[in-house]
């Protein structure tokens, strides 16, 4: 099957102040001929300014998390509707750092994905195994369980992107081998097809975990890899653009 149009999304995590908006300018200047869709998810404090800066460009801006509810007494939280109101087009949910740092489980991630859809956002839903789970041969079972528990009914290529992020590869400089990435992506594709039928063929599956300019071409060239979710290497426009340029 022909490759889907890839998505390269940057996840700035808890990094970035107003001075970092210069990186958005540089990314915009560099994606004129990009073969892929390009997104940056800055911290919530910068979403509106990043959207304002990127008006008229193909760069999409998004959030890194959202609360399941649209509004209410939830101090410190940001809703999907607020991200959309600020001009965001997508939201990451279920990132392993949220699952680990905030104890988020599959049911909550599912509710957050539904909130993203309610607000009209593209949902980038993260799944992935820990090192211990991989070592004990549980990778496929973990991925199946996370997909079943956190992807809501009604997923389509227009509203969902799945990000496969082995927890042990995030921010560590370690990447899964090409064989392991291809196997995990094929497994995810098969599970999505079981549940969502033919439409699942067009749901993009991103790889995330220490994607860098030096390994992006190999990873993005693999079967069933439809883009990358990039943490550390998205903070510098030059590195991020080198990854965008590696899209196929
Ligand atoms: P990393 O992070 O590229 O710094 O490993 C990826 C992610 O957590 O999305």
Image (cartoon, rainbow, N blue to C red):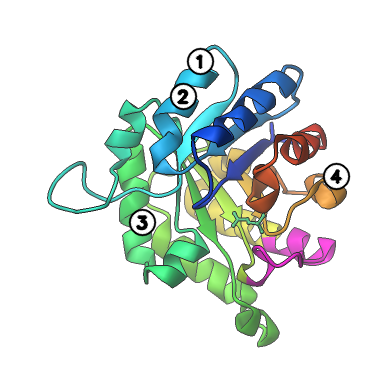
Label 3 residue near ligand 1, CB within 8 Å: no
Q: Quadrant of the N terminus?
A: top right
Residue range in magenta is 168-184
* Marked residue nearer the N-terminal end (1 or 4): 1
Frontmost of labels 2 and 3 is 2
Q: Residue at x 66, y 38 (%)?
A: 8
Image coordinates for residue 235, horizontal then vertical, percent: 64, 44
Residue that label 2 marks = 51
Label 2 CA crowd tier, 10 Å (few <14, some 14–19, many 20+): many
Residue that label 1 marks = 55
Toward the viewer: 21 or 219?
A: 21
Image coordinates for residue 63, horizontal then vertical, percent: 43, 41
Toward the viewer: 43 or 244?
A: 43
In the rendered image, which quarter is residue 54 located in?
Answer: top right
Q: Secondary structure at mark 3?
A: helix
Q: CA distance from mark 2 to mark 4?
A: 28 Å
């Amino acid at each position: 099957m022909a490759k889907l149009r890839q998505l390269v999304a940057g996840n700035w995590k808890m990094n970035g102040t107003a001075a970092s908006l210069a990186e958005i300018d540089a990314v915009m200047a560099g994606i004129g001929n990009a073969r892929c869709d390009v997104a940056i998810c800055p911290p919530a404090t910068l979403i509106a300014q990043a959207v304002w800066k990127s008006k008229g460009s193909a760069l999409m801006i998004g959030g890194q998390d959202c609360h399941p509810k649209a509004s209410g007494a939830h101090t410190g939280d940001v809703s999907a509707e607020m991200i959309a109101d600020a001009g965001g087009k997508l939201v990451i949910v279920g990132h392993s750092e949220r699952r680990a740092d905030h104890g988020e489980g599959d049911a909550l991630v599912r509710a957050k994905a539904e909130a993203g859809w309610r607000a009209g956002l593209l949902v980038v839903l993260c799944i992935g195994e820990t090192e211990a789970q991989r070592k004990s041969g549980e990778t496929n079972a973990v991925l199946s369980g996370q997909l079943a528990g956190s992807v809501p009914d009604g997923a389509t290529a227009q509203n969902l992107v799945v990000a496969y992020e082995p927890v042990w590869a995030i921010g560590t400089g370690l990447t899964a081998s090409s064989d392991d990435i291809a196997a995990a992506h094929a497994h995810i594709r098969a599970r999505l097809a079981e549940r969502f039928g033919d439409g699942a063929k067009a749901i993009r599956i991103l790889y995330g975990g220490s994607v860098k300019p030096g390994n992006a071409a190999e990873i993005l060239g693999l079967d069933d890899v439809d883009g990358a979710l990039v943490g550390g290497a998205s903070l510098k426009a030059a590195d991020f653009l080198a990854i965008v340029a590696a899209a196929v």
